[in-house]
Image (cartoon, helix red, strand yellow):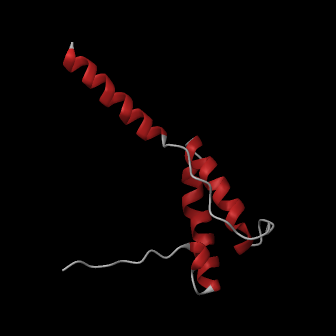
Amino acid sequence: MTETFTVQRLGTHPRPEKRRDYYRETVRFIVPLAERHPWFRDWFDAWRAEFGHLDGTAAVRGTPGRLEAAPASPLRRHRRGVTASRSRRATC
């Protein structure tokens, strides 16, 4: 038997007070950690621009949309590079 899970997104949560609380918790606890890495810092900057209206920290610009597709994580690029170098060593 398989279980089905539903992911609740910040912008679609049915309770506005929970959306505000989740936004504030993320800004308080997660965003400071993201500042240490450029990729995460840029992604959370876009996230804050999209959802900042929940805390009154960003102007609402038209219809809220989805975040644009984020660039590939530097960690993935690193892993690909490691895999490729291992393959080259194995064939030499």
Toward the viewer: 28 or 40?
A: 40
Quarter assignment of residue 85: top left
Q: Which residue does the image show at 58% across and 70% down from the upper left?
A: 25
Q: Is residue 48 left or right of residue 60?
A: left
Query: Which corner quadrant holds the N terminus?
Result: bottom left
In the picture shown, does residue 89 fall above or below 24?
A: above
Q: Work out which residue is located at the far bottom of the displayed protein and give it.
A: 15
Q: Is residue 83 left or right of residue 25?
A: left
Query: Which corner quadrant holds the C terminus?
Result: top left
Q: Position of residue 10 (x, y in %)?
A: 57, 73
Q: Work out which residue is located at the far top of the displayed protein and give it.
A: 92
Toward the viewer: 79 or 57?
A: 79
Toward the viewer: 23 or 15?
A: 15
Q: Position of residue 22 (x, y in %)?
A: 57, 74
Q: Which residue does the image show at 55% across and 44% down from the upper left?
A: 71
In the picture shown, does residue 18 fall above or below 81?
A: below
Q: Position of residue 35 (x, y in %)?
A: 60, 48
Q: Is residue 49 left or right of residue 8?
A: right
In the picture shown, does residue 73 fall above or below 8?
A: above
Q: How many marks?
A: 0
Q: Position of residue 64 (x, y in %)?
A: 70, 69
Quarter assignment of residue 84: top left
Q: Which residue does the image show at 58% across and 78% down from the upper left?
A: 12
Q: Which residue does the image show at 24% across and 18% down from the upper left?
A: 89
